[in-house]
Image (tube, grey):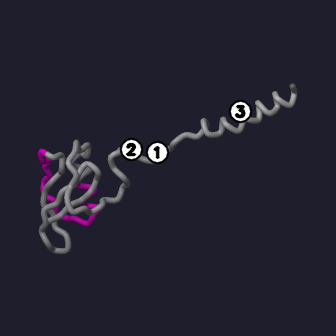
Amino acid sequence: MTVRAIMACGAMLLSSGAVAQTATHAGAHNPAVKNNDAARVAAPTKGANSFSEDQARGRLGKAGYQSLSRLAKDKDGVWRGTATKGGRKVHVGLDYKGNVTAR
C-alpha cells in the first residue's frame, strides 16, 4: 500500500510541471503581427487594420521610407500614402499584418 501511495504522488508531481508553464509576452501584443520587422510583400492583405496612423508611419519609417505623406486607410484596411526611398517617390501601403508594399 505504501509503494502505491508513493508512486501515485510521484506521478502527480511529474505531471504537474506541464500545467505550471505560462506564456510570457514582451511589449505590445497584436496576434495579427508576426514580428516587429516590417516585411515587404507583393500585395497587401485585406483585413481590419488596428494600427493607428502613427504606428503605420513608424513601421514604414523603420522599413526605410522617408518624407511620408499623410496616410489614409482604404476600404480594404490598408494604410496608403506616398514616401521617398533611395531618392525615388513611391506609393506605399501597410496591411493589418504589418507588411509593407511599394509601387
Question: Considering the numbered disc 2 on the image, is that residue within a helix, a strand or a loop?
Answer: loop
Question: Considering the numbered disc 1 on the image, is that residue within a helix, a strand or a loop?
Answer: loop
Q: Amino acid at mark 1?
A: His
The quadrant in which the N terminus is found is: top right
Separation (CA) of disc 3 from disc 1: 29 Å
Pair 3/1: label in front: 3
Query: Residue 95 location, x and y as percent?
Result: 23, 52
Q: Residue at x 26, y 50 (%)?
A: 55
- Per the image, the residue denoted by label 3 is 12
- Per the image, the residue denoted by label 1 is 25
Closer-to-camera residue (2/52): 2
Question: Considering the numbered disc 3 on the image, is that residue within a helix, a strand or a loop?
Answer: helix
The quadrant in which the C terminus is found is: bottom left
| Circles 3 and 1 in contact, beta carbons < 8 Å | no
Relative vertical location of residue 11 with respect to residue 28 in this rendering, above or below: above
Query: Residue 61 location, x and y as percent?
Result: 25, 61
What residue span does the magenta drawing correspond to? 57-75
The disc, 3 or 1, on the residue closer to the chain's N-terminal end is: 3
Separation (CA) of disc 2 from disc 3: 34 Å
Q: Residues within 10 Å of mark 2 (few under 14, many from 20)?
A: few
Q: Which mark is residue 84?
A: none
Q: Residue at x 13, y 49 (%)?
A: 72
Q: Residue at x 82, y 29 (%)?
A: 4
Query: Residue 28 location, x and y as percent?
Result: 38, 45
Residue 73 drawn in magenta = yes
Separation (CA) of disc 1 from disc 2: 7 Å
| Circles 1 and 2 in contact, beta carbons < 8 Å | yes
Q: Quadrant of residue 38?
A: bottom left
Left or right: residue 103 compared with residue 3: left
